């Protein structure tokens, strides 16, 4: 397998293959839950497909990256909170999850000039809001995580595009 | 961007940040063709934000289309069996 020390162990070809497998697997699970279709179900299906996309990205990368850990934790937390309304376990991630959740619900807010306690402003803060899991990272880690996140996201988009093309021509 | 000195971590140098920023530049579709270091850090960061946002939107859009496609597949048609075999 790939050596553990390699910083960019994501060879695009193998990443694409792994992403395709995982995404298809998630889609299959999604299909199994199928029930009768109506408008609400379609919106629900859209959300599930989107969730499957991010979930497969995060699963393929695993816990190697802060962004994938954040996504995995968010997913697990979402499943727990739909049943128990409790957030548990890691106290450090507790604050993380809440700020992540808040970020996703405030997605439609107009952009405000925001200076965080560290004195960052402008682009860096915007970037921290876009990439999951990097809120408390230093500048180096932020750039590194962003590069990896972009690579995976672009590959995931490519996988989905191929699938859409395939499904629409069958 | 580099005006902030990281506290308590003297290992982070400007060279490291420059290297990471140029690595980021290579990933961005807009700036990749420039092939030079002329793009400023703030421009790269801005392009990065825009690119991530556009990728998020593409995921949303593709999820929408995928969900529609999956829902319009009739269960008994030959297409469905092809897709089923693919999904397994």
Image: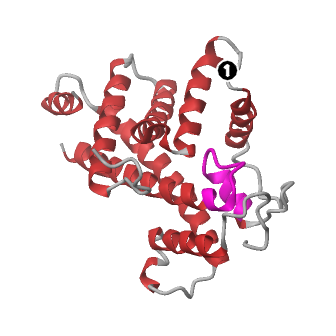
Camera-nearest residue between B86 and A8: A8
Residue B78 on the magenta span? no
Quadrant location, the N terminus of chain B: bottom right
Expressed as whole percent of the image width and height from the top left, the position of residue A45 reads: 45, 29
Expressed as whole percent of the image width and height from the top left, the position of residue B65 reads: 39, 44
Bounds of the magenta span?
A124-142
Q: Is residue B55 visible?
A: yes
**Residue B21, quarter of the rendered image:** bottom right
**Residue at 62% across, 12% down:** A83
Expressed as whole percent of the image width and height from the top left, the position of residue A138 reads: 69, 56
- Residue that numbered label 1 is attached to: A89
Q: Secondary structure at mark 1?
A: loop
**Residue at 76% across, 33% down:** A95
Question: Which residue extends farthest left?
Answer: B78
**Residue at 39% across, 49% down:** A156
Residue A129 on the magenta span? yes
């Amino acid at each position: 397998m790939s050596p553990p020390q390699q910083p960019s162990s994501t060879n695009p070809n193998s990443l694409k293959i792994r992403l395709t497998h995982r995404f298809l697997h998630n889609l299959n699970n999604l299909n199994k839950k199928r029930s009768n279709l109506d408008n609400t179900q379609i919106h629900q299906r859209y959300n599930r497909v989107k969730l499957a996309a991010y979930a497969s990205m995060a699963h393929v990368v695993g816990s190697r990256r802060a962004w994938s850990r954040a996504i995995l934790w968010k997913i697990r937390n979402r499943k727990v909170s739909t049943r128990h309304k409790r957030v548990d376990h890691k106290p450090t991630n507790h604050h993380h999850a809440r700020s992540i959740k808040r970020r996703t619900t405030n997605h439609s807010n107009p952009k405000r000039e925001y200076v965080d306690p560290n004195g960052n402003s402008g682009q860096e803060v915007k970037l921290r809001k876009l990439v999951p899991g990097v809120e408390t990272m230093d500048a180096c880690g932020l750039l590194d995580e962003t590069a990896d996140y972009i690579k995976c996201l672009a590959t995931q988009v490519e996988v989905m595009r191929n699938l859409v093309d395939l499904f629409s021509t069958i | 961007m580099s005006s902030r000195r990281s506290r308590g971590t003297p290992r982070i140098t400007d060279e490291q940040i420059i290297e990471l920023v140029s690595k980021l530049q290579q990933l961005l579709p807009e700036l990749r063709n420039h092939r030079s270091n002329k793009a400023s850090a703030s421009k790269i960061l801005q392009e990065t934000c825009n690119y991530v946002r556009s990728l998020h939107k593409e995921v949303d859009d593709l999820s929408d289309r995928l969900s529609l496609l999956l829902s319009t597949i009739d269960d008994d048609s030959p297409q469905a069996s092809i897709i089923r075999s693919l999904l397994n």
